[in-house]
C-alpha cells in the first residue's frame, strides 16, 4: 500500500532505550532508569481519591472539548497565585497531554511549508510533529554561551518560534529580559511565538511565564512533570481570546476531549501542594547526587541545570557515538541513559542526557554503578 512521506519521521530514541531496558529487565536484571523524564512519584493521593469517588458516583463520559469548566477555572487561579496574572478561564484549553497542545498549536498557527525555529539541543518531538504536518523545522544551533537558548539574532525568515524554559534536555531557563527580547523580535517580524512551560515549578529558580510579557502568544503546560501525572495524558494551553474558538473546533475533531478521568484527577492534584512541594525536595536531593557524582563517573563536562530534572553532558572525550555508548552503559552498568542524538541530530553524537526524575535511592545506586563502570573501563 502506498504510504505518506509525512510519516517518515525519526524515531524517538529515548523510547527505544526504554524498550531495550525493558528487555534487560525481562531477563531478571535490575535497571536504573536515567533515560526518561518520568517522575518516580505517582499522582498525588488527593488526585487518586477524587477519581475513585467520581468513578463510584457514575460513568465518566465525554466532556466539552475545551475541558471541564472547574479545571479551566482552577488553572486560571494558578496563574494568579504563581505569576500574579489575571488569565481568563475562557483562554484556558485542557488538552490530552502537552503533545496534543503542540499538535493543536502547529495546526492552528501554521500553513503547509511554513518554517518554525527550534533550538538544538531540544525536545525531539517538536521536530518530528512539525515534519509530520508538512511543516519545516528550522534548527537553531544554540550554544553554551547562550545557555543553549535562542537569541533574537537567530530569528530570521521563519513563521514561528518555539521556546522551552526550563528546557529539555539542558534544564536551562530564560530570564524575563531575554524572553521579552525574543517575543519582541517575533512580534516585530510577525513570527508566531509558542512557549513550552511544562517544567515550570521544578528546580530552585522561579521561571518566567511568557504570559508575563504578552497575551499574543501560545503557552503549553502539562500535568506530567510538576504534578507527576505522565501516564494520565492531560495538559493545558493558554491562547489569545480570539483563538479559543478555532482551538475548540480543532479539539472537537481531533480529540473530542481530554480524558474525563484525568481531568478530575488533575483538578484535585492542583490542591495537593504539600505533597507536590515534597517532590521538589526529592529533585533537589537528586540533583546534588548527580552534580556531585557524575564527574567521578567520567562525565565532568556539563552545565548544572537551572530547572527541570536533566543533565546534558558532553561525552566527546569518551566517544563519537553516543548511541553506542548508551548501549554499552546499559549492558555493562545496568543504567539506561539517552543519547544526545535525540535532541541534536548534528552534535548529539557526542552528548548524553541523564534524567534524575526517579527516586533518590535509585540515583545513588545509578551513580555508584556508573563510577564502577568507568573505573573498569579504564
Image: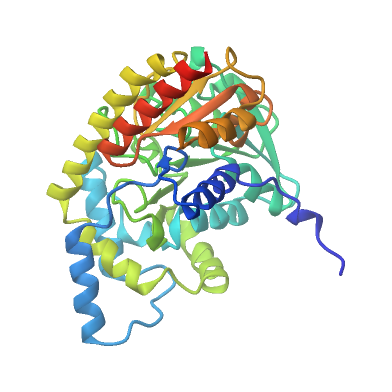
Asked whether, in this view, residue 245 is left or right of residue 32, the answer is right
Residue 372, x across and y down, in percent: 41, 22
280 and 29: which is toward the camera: 29
364 and 355: which is toward the camera: 364
Work out which quarter of the rendered image holds the N terminus and state it: bottom right
Asked whether residue 292 appears in the rendered view, the answer is yes
Residue 293, x across and y down, in percent: 34, 20
4 and 62: which is toward the camera: 4
Residue at left offset 57%, top offset 73%: 253
Using the image, determine if residue 295 lies above or below residue 112. Answer: above
331 and 84: which is toward the camera: 331
Residue at left offset 33%, top offset 41%: 358
Name the outermost residue toward the bottom: 58
Using the image, determine if residue 322 lies above or below residue 317. Answer: below
Asked whether residue 120 appears in the rendered view, the answer is no
Q: Indicate how the structure is coloured in the image.
A: rainbow
Asked whether, in this view, residue 377 is left or right of residue 273, the answer is right
Residue 142, x across and y down, in percent: 57, 21
Asked whether, in this view, residue 154 is left or right of residue 111, the answer is left
Name the outermost residue toward the right: 2
Asked whether, in this view, residue 130 is left or right of residue 221, the answer is right
Residue 120, x across and y down, in percent: 59, 29
What is the number of callouts on the image? 0
Residue at left offset 58%, top offset 44%: 126
Amino acid at each position: 500500500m502506498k504510504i505518506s512521506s509525512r510519516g517518515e519521521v525519526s524515531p524517538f530514541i529515548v523510547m527505544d532505550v526504554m524498550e531495550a531496558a525493558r528487555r534487560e529487565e525481562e531477563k531478571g536484571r535490575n535497571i536504573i532508569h536515567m533515560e526518561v523524564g518520568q517522575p518516580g512519584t505517582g499522582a498525588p493521593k488527593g488526585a487518586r481519591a477524587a477519581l475513585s469517588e467520581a468513578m463510584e458516583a457514575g460513568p465518566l463520559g465525554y466532556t466539552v472539548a475545551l475541558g471541564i469548566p472547574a479545571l479551566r477555572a482552577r488553572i486560571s487561579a494558578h496563574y494568579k497565585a504563581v505569576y500574579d496574572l489575571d488569565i481568563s478561564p475562557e483562554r484556558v484549553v485542557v488538552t490530552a497531554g502537552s503533545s496534543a497542545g503542540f499538535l493543536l498549536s502547529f495546526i492552528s498557527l501554521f500553513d503547509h511549508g511554513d518554517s518554525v525555529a527550534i533550538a538544538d539541543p531540544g525536545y525531539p518531538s517538536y521536530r518530528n510533529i512539525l515534519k509530520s504536518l508538512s511543516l519545516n523545522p528550522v534548527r537553531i544551533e544554540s550554544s553554551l554561551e547562550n545557555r543553549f537558548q535562542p537569541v533574537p539574532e537567530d530569528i530570521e525568515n521563519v513563521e514561528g518560534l518555539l521556546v522551552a524554559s526550563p528546557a529539555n534536555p539542558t534544564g536551562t531557563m530564560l530570564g524575563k529580559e531575554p524572553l521579552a527580547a525574543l517575543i519582541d523580535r517575533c512580534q516585530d517580524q510577525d513570527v508566531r511565538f509558542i512557549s513550552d512551560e511544562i517544567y515550570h515549578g521544578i528546580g530552585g529558580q522561579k521561571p518566567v511565564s511568557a504570559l508575563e510579557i504578552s497575551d499574543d502568544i501560545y503557552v503549553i503546560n502539562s500535568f506530567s512533570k510538576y504534578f507527576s501525572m505522565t501516564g494520565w495524558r492531560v495538559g493545558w494551553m493558554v491562547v489569545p481570546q480570539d483563538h479559543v474558538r478555532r482551538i475548540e473546533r480543532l479539539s472537537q475533531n481531533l480529540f473530542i476531549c481530554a480524558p474525563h478521568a484525568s481531568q478530575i484527577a488533575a483538578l484535585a492534584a492542583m490542591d495537593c501542594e504539600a505533597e507536590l512541594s515534597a517532590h521538589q525536595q526529592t529533585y533537589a536531593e537528586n540533583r546534588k547526587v548527580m552534580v556531585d557524582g557524575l564527574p567521578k563517573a567520567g562525565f565532568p563536562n556539563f552545565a548544572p541545570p537551572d530547572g527541570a530534572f536533566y543533565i546534558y553532558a558532553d561525552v566527546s572525550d569518551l566517544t563519537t557515538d553516543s548511541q553506542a555508548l548508551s548501549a554499552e552503559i546499559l549492558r555493562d552498568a545496568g543504567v539506561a541513559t539517552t543519547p544526545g542524538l535525540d535532541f541534536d541530530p548534528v552534535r548529539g553524537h557526542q552528548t548524553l542526557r541523564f534524567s534524575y526524575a526517579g527516586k533518590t535511592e535509585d540515583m545513588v545506586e545509578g551513580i555508584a554503578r556508573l563510577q564502577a563502570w568507568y573505573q573498569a573501563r579504564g
